[in-house]
Amino acid sequence: MIDYVLQPVVDIGTGVVYGYEAQIRNCDGDDTRTADELIDESHTQGFLPQLEARLFTRALECFSALKIAQGTKLYFKLDGRDLGEAGDPRMRFAELVTGAGLKVDQICLEFSERHQQTFTDVTHHAINDLRQLGFMIALDDFGRGSSELRLLHDLSPDYVKIDRFFLNGIDCDARRKLFVTTVANLAHVLGARVIAEGVETEPEFKACREAGCDLIQGYFVARPFRKATSARLFYDHVRAPGHGHKRQQEQERIRNELVQLPTIRFDASMNELIDMVVHNQDGSVIPVLNATFEPRGLIHERDLKAYLYTGGADEDDAKAALDFPLRSFVRACPIADIDSNADMLLVTFASSINSDGIIITENFRYAGFLSATSLLKIIHEKRLQEAQDQNPLTRLPGNGAIARFISDMAGNSGHERHLCYLDFDNFKPFNDTYGYRQGDRAIILFSELLQRHISGTGTFRGHIGGDDFFVGFLNCDQTDVAARMLALKRAFRVDVESFYEHEHRERGFIEAQDRFGTTRQFPLLQCSVSILSLTKGMTVSPDTLNDEIMGLKRAAKRSDDGLAVKCLAA
């Protein structure tokens, strides 16, 4: 007997379960037979619509029986061939949903490019009809075929699922990460959410989060299950590290600029919409929400007026205008979460066409509307703050930002933290020999290498001043931190050699006076690295951290390899 298992789809930032994908198991008692083979055979024999209607009914039964899943979404793969033809039972899915005691907007129908070439105008009209009934639409396996961009345009999906191919090893493949980041940006501009599907490892998960994915699904989160006892409300290991002071400050700026526009339900009547427009003369757009307060798009007042004013003056035309579905006026709108980086919000807005602003959500629920004017104000304030915090030579965060970061890390006991201090060895003799301009060039070189080697969510880079730099890591492995620091150290040692004359490079040293006025030999420039790690559960005062870091700095200078590591445990 064909049955279903459910696999959680989880908020990539909080670990809270957002929905479940229904996956076929035990195809007619033959475990070697795949779901695709079953679907293809039923299509060949001419009963695909009837089979998918039965499968959908079974998936609804499994989902509705899972009490912990109340209020979440069900993702159901729909083949889509011959959809909308005469007597197609799949067009009565809404009745099945209601009969199962669920709401239509809890159901997300997934379509892939697998049979996109067979989609006719009837198919696309049928998908639009299902959307008008309140179903959410997902584009599955994005990137697998050659027509995804066309399908993304035609379907205007609510969700885009990235194909596993682009997520496999994304943490160590810059091209794959660039693809996922680009798709995520494009999807957000079009008002869609991005699901990373089939994520299997923690490094892949972190890379997907950095690339801008909204939701995550795969063995790293949880395997598909049948038993209700396996279900959970959230997965703590998926929870993102807390935001530092700087990000909290930025989030507060965004929150303060949000406009609380009057909203309307996706299933509201035209009379309700017109009444809202009449009583709210100041707004030019109206956000449209579903029953769970998730945004479905915007209605522009100009579109509504253009439609209402084109009809005739008689009563029948006016009545016909009011009978037209409100949902037909909903336009896709750029969408972003409240904790988005302000610069990314600007990219999202700039990439959209004829956009009045961005819909901002919090935990996927509507939080407010960010206008273009407010967004520019946020960016301007951010640039002013950055200018105050930056070191003027390297443009990296300066002492104020570093002090705030250390203070945040001192009390953030919920995660493992690593504080790194880096400074040059024998920098004064180099400056004395080649001059301060060449010394500044060496500092700029190091800052560029630092930004190249240290990046991503949970990292911080700062320039204390002169040849002293600071790096922070949140929720990273100490081995990985040490490896990245050593790679940076090696890169600087190799690249800075070009700053020396040929004779000095050949000898491997320069002769200069030390601080006591004695002429002696000094090796070529390299840097010392101190790594102070704080285990999860450990809290300490910022002053203690600074003292520990300074002690490690001296230890690193004395060590043979220029590296000192210490761990503070609770």
Image (tube, rainbow, N blue to C red):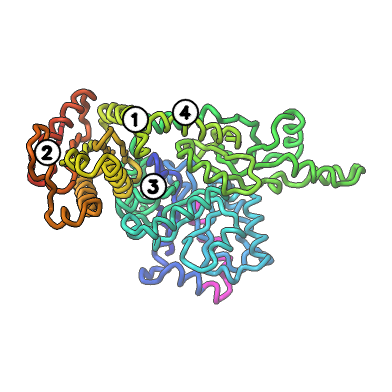
User: Element type at marker 2?
Assistant: strand
Evaluate if marks 1 and 3 touch, with contact meaning CB atoms under 8 Å apart: no
**Which residue in the structure is indicated by mark 3?**
210
Tell me which numbered mark, 3 or 2, is placed earlier along the sequence. Answer: 3
Measured in 3D between alpha carbons, the distance from the residue under mark 4 to the one under mark 1, in whole angstroms, is: 17 Å
The span shown in magenta is: 42-61
Residue at point 65% right, 56% down?
A: 128
**Which residue in the structure is indicated by mark 4?**
252
Q: Nearer the viewer, mark 3 or mark 2?
A: 2
Question: Is residue 488 toward the left or the right of residue 387 in the image?
Answer: left
Q: Amino acid at mark 4?
A: Glu
Q: Amino acid at mark 3?
A: Glu
Crowding at mark 2 (Cα within 10 Å: few <14, some 14-19, many 20+): some
**Which residue in the structure is indicated by mark 2?**
513
Q: Amino acid at mark 2?
A: Gln
Q: Nearer the viewer, mark 1 or mark 3?
A: 1
**Which residue in the structure is indicated by mark 1?**
401
Tell me which numbered mark, 4 or 3, is placed earlier along the sequence. Answer: 3
Q: Position of residue 448 (x, y in %)?
A: 32, 47
